[in-house]
Each structure stands twice: as C-alpha cells, then as structure tokens.
Image (cartoon, rainbow, N blue to C red):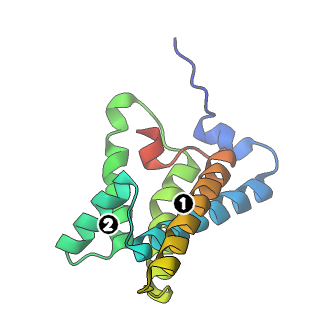
C-alpha cells in the first residue's frame, strides 16, 4: 500500500510547535493573498491560476477574492477521486487567501507609470515564493491547487 509523504490531518494538528506553526501558516497565507493583489495591480502578468481567477471575476459580479475561494472549493472536489484528504492548512488556504486578496485590492492603488508597476510585479513574485514556503513549511497540508 502506498504511504503518503505528508502527514494526515490528525498528525498535522498533533505535530510540535503548534502555535508557531499556526502563526507561520496564517502569516504565509496572508502574504500569499497580498502577493497576488500586487501582481493584479501591476497589470503586467499573472500566474496561470490567477489568470483564470481574474477572467472569472471580470465576467461575473464576484470579487477577485470570492472567485479564489469558490474555485478553491471546486478544486477540492477534484481531490475526491484521488483519495487525497485536505489538511487544516488546505481549508485555511481556500478561505484566507481570497480574503487577503480582496482586502489588499481594496487599499492598494493601481500605479499608472511603468516603474512602480514593475516593482509591484517583482515584489509580488518574490513575496509569493516566500509565502508559499511559509504556508507549506507549516506542515498543515498543501493548498487546494498544490494538492491537485
């Protein structure tokens, strides 16, 4: 029988350093949402999933963050035939990232000149990498899209 490399949801919660890991998880997810909003505001490009999120948000009356949350839940349904169980971090990811994206988009102005737009894009990409390392490193499970 195949043994999973990642801990199951119960093992995730029983792991040591729980308060520090929870802080790492939620800070990482918040930064992840901020990084996406930075790339959106740059208007210079997005990762593939975010192109889909943006397209759906533009064609519906839903906010970008709401689309992120709803699509996360749809992606989680695709886990069922793979017999993969979401962890606490997986569920938190599905919700917190969308909230953080919308909160950041509400306060982050869109620059008009190219230099600050490039800065937002590069900063967003760098923060995205840091945030991914943080939330995955917390060992509460992958994000919905990561697990797919």
Q: Are marks 2 and 1 in contact (CB under 8 Å)?
A: no
**Residue 30: % across, % down:** 59, 68
Along the horizontal axis of the image, is 129 left or right of 60? right
Say what secondary structure mark 2 lies in: helix
User: Residue most toward the top?
Assistant: 1
**Residue 36: % across, % down:** 47, 66
Q: Nearer the viewer, residue 116 or 63?
A: 116
Along the horizontal axis of the image, is 132 left or right of 109? right
Q: Nearer the viewer, residue 90 or 27?
A: 27
Instruction: Tell me the crowding category of disc 1: few under 14, some 14 to 19, or many 20 or more residues within 10 angstroms, Cα based.
Output: some
Q: CA distance from mark 2 to mark 1?
A: 20 Å
**Residue 94: % across, % down:** 45, 58
* Picture mark count: 2
Q: Nearer the viewer, residue 40 or 101?
A: 40
Along the horizontal axis of the image, is 79 left or right of 61? right
**Residue 104: % across, % down:** 50, 80
Say what secondary structure mark 1 lies in: helix
Instruction: Tell me the crowding category of disc 2: few under 14, some 14 to 19, or many 20 or more residues within 10 angstroms, Cα based.
Output: many
Residue under numbered circle 1: 125
Q: Residue at x 54, y 44 (%)?
A: 142
**Which circle's residue, 2 or 1, is located before the other in the chain?**
2
Quarter of the image for the C terminus: give it: top left
Q: Residue at x 57, y 51 (%)?
A: 88
Eyeballing the image, is 121 above or below 21? below
Q: Residue at x 24, y 65 (%)?
A: 55
Res 16 quadrant in image: top right
Image mark for residue 67 = 2
Q: Residue at x 55, y 73 (%)?
A: 119
Eyeballing the image, is 5 above or below 19? above
């Amino acid at each position: 029988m195949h043994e999973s490399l990642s801990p199951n949801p119960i093992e995730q919660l029983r792991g040591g350093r729980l308060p520090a890991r929870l802080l790492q998880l939620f800070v990482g997810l918040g930064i992840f949402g901020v990084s996406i909003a930075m790339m959106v505001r740059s208007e210079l490009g997005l990762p593939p999933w975010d192109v889909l999120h943006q397209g759906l948000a533009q064609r519906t009356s839903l906010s970008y963050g709401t689309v992120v949350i709803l699509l996360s839940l749809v992606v989680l349904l695709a886990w069922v035939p793979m017999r993969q169980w979401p962890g606490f971090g997986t569920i938190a990811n599905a919700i917190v990232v969308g909230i953080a994206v919308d909160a950041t988009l509400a306060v982050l102005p869109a620059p008009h000149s190219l230099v600050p737009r490039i800065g937002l894009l590069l900063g967003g990409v760098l923060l995205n990498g840091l945030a991914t390392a943080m939330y995955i490193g917390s060992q509460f499970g992958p994000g919905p899209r990561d697990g797919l």
